[in-house]
Image (tube, grey):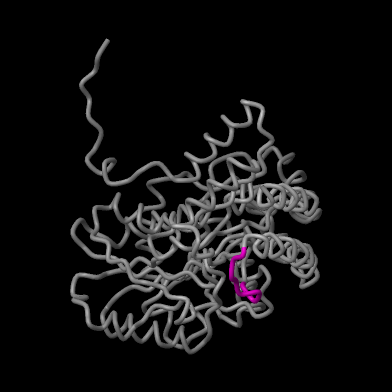
Amino acid sequence: MSLNIAPANRINQVEEYYFSIKLKELEKLRQEGKSIINLGIGNPDLAPAPSVLEELNKQSNEKTNHGYQSYVGIPELRSAFSSWYDKYYNVKVDPSKEVLPLMGSKEGIMHITMAFLNPGDSVLVPNPGYPTYASASKIAQANLIHYDLDENNGWFPNLTELEKLDLSKVKLMWINYPNMPTGAKANVQFFKDIIAFGKKHNIVICNDNPYSFILNEDPQSIMSVEGAKDIAIELNSLSKSHNMAGWRVGMAMSNPTFIQYILHVKSNMDSGMFKPLQLAAVKALELDEKWYATINKEYKARRLLVEDIMDLLECDYDNKQSGMFVWAKIPSKYSDSGELSDKILYGSDVFITPGFIFGDKGKQYIRISLCTKQEVLIEAKQRIENILKQ
């Protein structure tokens, strides 16, 4: 039977997520007998804190905890996010009006996009940058204006160059610091400058901030800048900082008006987060500095091994990067990152992320995740050594 049913036009604007496609390829190679090591995805392999798991188990056994929950999250979770921001970012947040728990910050990207962008509006998207910023904008039928991030400028946007553009239709700008994929850290002056830029041009500045506790001794929030709440939104998440990626617990923070805009979309897309997850997330947010020190000790050891791999590949990198990746520039003997990535995958059964997936400004870079046990990284290093000797 042949059906002549076309999808919505917006489907033609986006492709299947790169890692969704790549994971299928890696699985096919495994089925063919290949022992694939995946160094590509930032999927934390460490467990959440024991107290968090205990709380989830305890609350899941409460018979009254299995019904629908509020779209705005339970008060305990909103208060925990508020206290977390006060303690670690020195930011005061009204838990009743300025914070909105989300089923992951990736979902929040779509909520914000749908809440602020009409078809034909413009949005500023970083290059290189997280692909979801662009794909969400395309689904909303907005016009993408890619702005370049350059290593020579510390991987910051060049606001002077952006000022030369016609920004009259731009309503939203995505930034992401600590940056993924480059690992660049922001500073207070940059946040002041970007807030001033947003206010001058009436552009909502959205900072996606899930990496601020990973290999970073000075967590920063754009909301620490005076007046930031007037024009900015910040997304955050427990996925990376608390090893809770599959739990889907995130948040958006902004002024009460912006939060209500986002809630208008969110409340039509989900039916509230499982209450035991929320109560366990409260426990996670109450963890002290020892928790972050413990996970960062492991990531530091892994980063040294990844740097050894980058040295083998003759790549250049900044050893002061934040986040759970190492981003490195490839040698000029390779035409682009895809060539090097394929050489390693098909020669040694090790997958390394090619930087081109983050935009054309990433074509000469590769990225390796730290979410792999040390013994596996050692094995990957040995495999790559063997292929390079050939």
* Quadrant in which residue 367 is drawn: bottom right
Assign the magenta stretch its main secondary structure.
Answer: loop
Q: Is residue 315 magenta?
A: yes
111, 366: nearer the viewer: 366
Q: Position of residue 20 (x, y in %)?
A: 49, 41
44, 308: nearer the viewer: 308
- 219 left or right of 169 in image: right
Q: Position of residue 221 (x, y in %)?
A: 54, 77
Q: Is residue 83 above or below residue 268?
A: below
Identify the image quadrant of the N terminus.
Answer: top left
Residue in the image at 75% along x and 50% along y: 382
Which segment did they paint magenta?
314-321
Q: Can residue 109 be spotted in the picture? A: yes
64, 149: nearer the viewer: 149
- 386 left or right of 153 in image: right
Q: Can residue 97 be spotted in the picture? A: no
Residue in the image at 50% along x and 61% along y: 333
Q: Is residue 298 magenta?
A: no
Q: Position of residue 230 (x, y in %)?
A: 38, 80
